[in-house]
Amino acid sequence: MGANERRGVCFSALSSRKGHGLTAHATAPRALAARARRAAPLAAHRPDADAPDAGKGQRVMIIGGDGYCGWATALHLSKRGYAVSIVDNLCRRSMDDQLGFNSLTPIKGIHERVRKWKEVSGRDIDLFIGDVCDYEFLSAAFQKFSPTACVHFGEQRSAPYSMMDRTRAIFTQTNNVMGTINALYAVKEFAPDCHMIKLGTMGEYGTPNIDIEEGYITITHNGRTDTLPYPKQGGSFYHLSKCHDSANMLFCTKAWGLRTTDLNQGVVYGVSTDECDMHPDLVNRLDYDAVFGTALNRFCIQAAVGHPMTVYGKGGQTRGFLNIKDTVRCIQIACDNPAPAGEMKIYNQFTEQFSVNELAAMITEAGKKIGLSPEVINVPNPRTEMEEHYYNAKNSKLQDLGLTPTLMSESLMDSLLKTIVEYKDRVDQRLILPGVNWKESASVGKTLAK
Amino acid sequence: MGANERRGVCFSALSSRKGHGLTAHATAPRALAARARRAAPLAAHRPDADAPDAGKGQRVMIIGGDGYCGWATALHLSKRGYAVSIVDNLCRRSMDDQLGFNSLTPIKGIHERVRKWKEVSGRDIDLFIGDVCDYEFLSAAFQKFSPTACVHFGEQRSAPYSMMDRTRAIFTQTNNVMGTINALYAVKEFAPDCHMIKLGTMGEYGTPNIDIEEGYITITHNGRTDTLPYPKQGGSFYHLSKCHDSANMLFCTKAWGLRTTDLNQGVVYGVSTDECDMHPDLVNRLDYDAVFGTALNRFCIQAAVGHPMTVYGKGGQTRGFLNIKDTVRCIQIACDNPAPAGEMKIYNQFTEQFSVNELAAMITEAGKKIGLSPEVINVPNPRTEMEEHYYNAKNSKLQDLGLTPTLMSESLMDSLLKTIVEYKDRVDQRLILPGVNWKESASVGKTLAK
């Protein structure tokens, strides 16, 4: 069955609820129990989505394929018969070196990873090591691989990193925005029918006092109506770089007739996917430092090593979350549903909303069950953000295309905590407390080493 | 009288009409006559705005002060007692050299201009030649000059230039976005009370099917209400760079407590200001080529040299316009009304709306009166834009602060046409037809020389 035939096939296993509430004030343990009851088994977005030839005929270039989301996605698609290439300059590893960070899990080098994957799965992944900001390299990769879809994870993806100092602010916006412009030109020039799938972030929307729609909003104003890009309010140079990307991609889509999808992803948590679990050398990275570690993963690691969970400010900050198992399925869904030429699809890619306080309460509950004694401390908020606010973001489009959410549950939290406990001797507790303050961002960075 | 005392003083000479209609279908010659009757004499925004010490105590750094708007603004403020410095890397001149363009008017070098200004006016202008993307240079300029206001015109400002090829697209967004980030860091670090006044463009809004508000829009959605940044739809890499600037500046304003003003300027026309007219060596640049020449100026020049006016597509494209005499007054008003710390003011800086067809009709009428025989041709539209659309942009805020618009009138058009006829032998007609097509923008630029 060819790619075009498959595109129309879509098995919807959508559950009727949306998996999130309007406020941040639900009692967390009860909410957790309720969620555990509702958790559905993983379901594919079409009957044959997990078949070994599900992706036959599709050639997917994964920019940033050595990173947290990129690596899991590369294996997920490769396993299902999509021809996969990874484009990466490995700068994420170099940032760890520079800042003295490390992944909780002992990840292998990319060459070793790809060799092991071939050994374990029998599948090849093409490797292009280079920088998307280097157009000569990028165009060679496009010509060599001839992608039918390009999944662009290849951006500096930490808000605190972007706020460390002017140099890193400039790096973040240059790397992300110019890298995406290059990728758009490469599609236009070498693969005009290639479906460009770019990762954005839910953080592009900020925390408006109205419902967050999926990318576009219909506004009636002074008696007239139009559907326009949803107003964006990025809260760091990183988040802003993603806003800029979205605006640039929308323009190129219309001006050049490209096929594009913008995925505004929530905070990803977890480390396990079926493919990364196939061999210890395929293990995914898991960040716990205050720069690259995101809320849920970082809290679990803090709980596991006996460090109090560091809630920034009041903890009423509410965001959308998703399990990395769903990230990889969302990308597969996007690949299988290319946008028509000249149209940019926008999906909000998360499955549940939680406040920081809810997260901490859920982890406390789950931690106790496996013999931990998690504690919470409120530390001064290093960011400029609202700590109590309305938050209601829509996320039905991916579910309409067949995503069945992997909801937060005790068993999932259990297994994440147990994985972490296994590696807890690798944790450097000095890296946990926030070291980057939004207001203090200066032209010349301070040394982070302590 | 010090700057702080003056800030509350505001003489409003606002006329009651807004100077624009809702549609692009008014019969142009009649509209012109009506406008001529209504044209008010230039009026200051406060009684002493034109006094030789009106700007006493203010130190205004003008980034891009060698350019079309920047040069006129520098002289306007300098004449009125504002201490002025110009920061410029002169890249606009170098672009003319590269592309084989020239200003219709024979402009002098910046050093000669500044020396002549001192001779004519007795006023000093400090000159810092360098690049805002070079932070070492920019921070030295800030420390040396200690600005109380920074007016940022220093961006690549041509949409066609940004669409020529990938290199120039990347240059435009890097130069503009990173230059502005540098300027924001410089303000934060060296002059935290300095009022940052950044030039945006009306083109950031695109052509939505609802009224265009001034920067923010109050949206009621699913029963809740919030005031959010107006949705942007930039129509070229240049326009998008300005959208990115606005988003970055709004974030920095809130995170760092800066005082900022974003001026979404319309298409500027004209060449004469009181100060530029004081000596031939102070003459401002006037661009007529298809890359840097904007609609009204370019049409006048075409009419003057006997080249048909080149209307792109159907000519229903409607935009906001203002005379350069008003640009300089708007900047003075902005300087005199600094934003409170942590707030970004946004004004739409234009005085009248016209469609391209209306412009062509007005120029035809005015040209005939001075013995020209202007003609119009419709050429294929090189841009991706709507050619017939709703357009109603608000522009009351600057008028509420005292701007009295210099409306388009027969006498103004007369004097512009006569100035142009004076220099018409300098026109290279090969530069007039559009050479940059939005759809054809490729990774490697073609040679423009013919």
Image: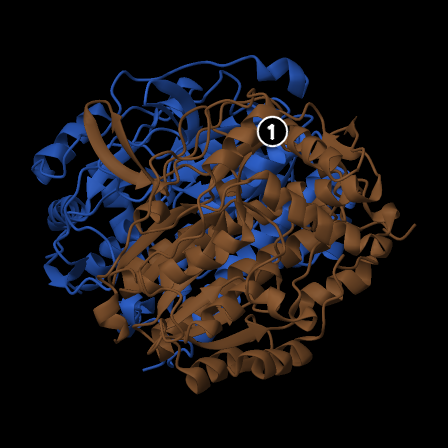
Chain colours: A blue, B brown
Query: Which residue appears at 60% of the width and 29% of the height?
Result: B317
Q: Quarter of the image containing the N terminus of chain A?
A: top right
Q: Position of residue B220 (x, y in %)?
A: 24, 27
Residue in the foreground of this view, choosing between A428 and B182: B182
Q: Chain of mark 1?
A: B
Residue A10, placed above or below residue A424: above
Residue A324, placed above or below residue B48: above
Query: Which residue appears at 15% of the width and 35% of the height?
Result: A32
Residue B163 shown left or right of residue B192 in the figure? right
Count of marks placed on residues = 1
Residue A449, placed above or below residue B344: below
Q: Position of residue A135 (x, y in %)?
A: 71, 54
Residue B287 shown left or right of residue B429 in the figure? left
Query: Which residue appears at 58% of the width and 44% of the height?
Result: A120
Residue A221, by quadrant, is top left
Q: Residues within 10 Å of mark 1 (few under 14, many from 20)?
A: many
Residue A128 shown left or right of residue B53 in the figure? right
Residue in the foreground of this view, choosing between B110 and B303: B303
Residue B1, by quadrant, is bottom left
Q: Tell me if residue B294 can be seen.
A: no
Amino acid tagged 1:
Gln
Q: Position of residue B285 (x, y in %)?
A: 68, 61
Q: Quarter of the image containing the C terminus of chain A?
A: bottom left
Q: Tell me if residue A111 can be seen.
A: yes
Residue identified by numbered label 1? B317
Residue in the foreground of this view, choosing between B298 and A226: B298
